[in-house]
Image: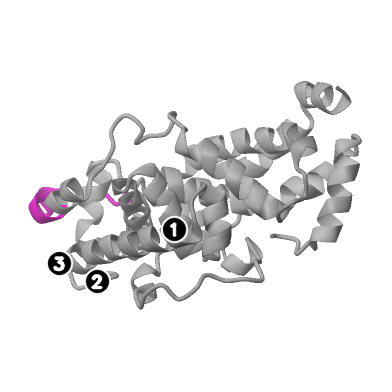
């Protein structure tokens, strides 16, 4: 977690927050804000959707805090609340227009990238290429069904131990490991076939920048990834038990980076903590 709070320290803060201590509540939410934001970003595909969903999750954490029985790590409980919310979240960009690996592959094979004029708006093409690389690989995860996406993210990005991940997802550790292995292979096979950045495919981000801008996949005026602050995953989640070695595919998933919560996310948290409805919740 962000501030490296021990479970004992977290337990004390939770008790204080449940009694109405606002400072304690702020510390709790701050400690998991990056975790919730990154999980939302990878699950939903875009920064704006991740920010909105994260706000909803923070509300659920706050309103259910008194029900946390301290039978597991607090971060495990937060993961469970977050995953359950994200699996049923229907307000994101891809909710009504799901992607598939077949569609993504066909676009790479058939997209008319040479027929597009310069649309870079004066932004360096290398910057736009990096933005496209991170955006494309993140959106690629939308080709997985929601539960498979969560399994991939928990195992590949957060590197959760299978017992903990299984607990979060409501399945056995063995079932989780088997599904994670199949999903990682599926993603790696796609990257190996099509992606020239993380595999041996023909697709090169630099060559597709203008095509991506034309199709509203990146926006030179709003470079979310370029403006985000990358942080080590260990600052987001610090489990003593790391994920077991599942396969030898880790080098294929270098795009699974973690970022600090955006300024908008922090503003939404501040507004939430100072809101009148929250005061009613805390005083109820």
Badge 2: how crowded within 10 Å, few (<14), some, or many (20+)? some
How many angstroms separate mark 2 from mark 3 (CA)? 9 Å
How many angstroms separate mark 1 from mark 2 (CA)? 25 Å
Q: In this orientation, does residue 138 appear? A: yes
SS at mark 2?
loop
Residue 155 lies left or right of residue 113; in this view the side is right
The residue under label 3 is 202
Q: How many labels does the image show?
A: 3
Residue plotted at (82% across, 54% down): 10
SS at mark 3?
loop
Q: Which of 269 and 9 is in front in this view?
A: 9
Is residue 118 depicted above or below 97 in this figure? below
Q: Give the range drawn in magenta.
A: 108-121
Residue 117 magenta: yes
Residue 138 lies left or right of residue 3; in this view the side is left
Is residue 218 depicted above or below 247 in this figure? above
Mark 1 or 2, which is nearer the eye?
1
């Amino acid at each position: 977690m962000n501030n490296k709070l021990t479970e004992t320290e977290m337990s004390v803060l939770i008790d204080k927050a449940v009694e109405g201590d606002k400072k304690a509540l702020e510390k709790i939410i701050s400690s998991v804000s990056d975790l919730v934001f990154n999980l939302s970003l990878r699950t939903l595909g875009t920064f704006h959707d991740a920010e909105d969903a994260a706000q909803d999750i923070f509300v659920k954490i706050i309103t259910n805090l008194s029900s946390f029985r301290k039978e597991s790590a607090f971060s495990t409980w937060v993961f469970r609340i977050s995953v359950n919310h994200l699996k049923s979240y229907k307000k994101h960009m891809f909710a009504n227009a799901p992607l598939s690996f077949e569609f993504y592959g066909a676009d790479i094979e058939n997209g008319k990238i040479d027929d597009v004029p310069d649309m870079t708006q004066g932004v360096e093409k290398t910057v736009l290429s990096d933005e496209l690389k991170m955006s494309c690989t993140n959106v690629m995860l939308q080709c997985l069904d929601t539960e498979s996406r969560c399994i991939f993210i928990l195992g590949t990005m957060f590197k959760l131990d299978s017992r903990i991940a299984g607990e979060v997802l409501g399945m056995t550790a063995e079932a989780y490991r088997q599904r994670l292995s199949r999903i990682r292979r599926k993603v790696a096979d796609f990257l190996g076939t099509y992606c020239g950045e993380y595999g041996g495919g023909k697709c090169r981000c630099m060559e597709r920048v203008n095509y991506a801008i034309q199709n509203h996949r990146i926006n030179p005026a709003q470079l979310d990834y370029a403006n985000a602050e990358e942080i080590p995953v260990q600052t987001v989640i610090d489990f003593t038990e790391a994920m077991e070695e599942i396969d030898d595919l880790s080098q294929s998933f270098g795009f699974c980076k973690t970022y600090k919560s955006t300024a908008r996310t922090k503003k939404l948290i501040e507004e939430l903590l100072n809101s009148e409805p929250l005061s009613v919740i805390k005083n109820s």
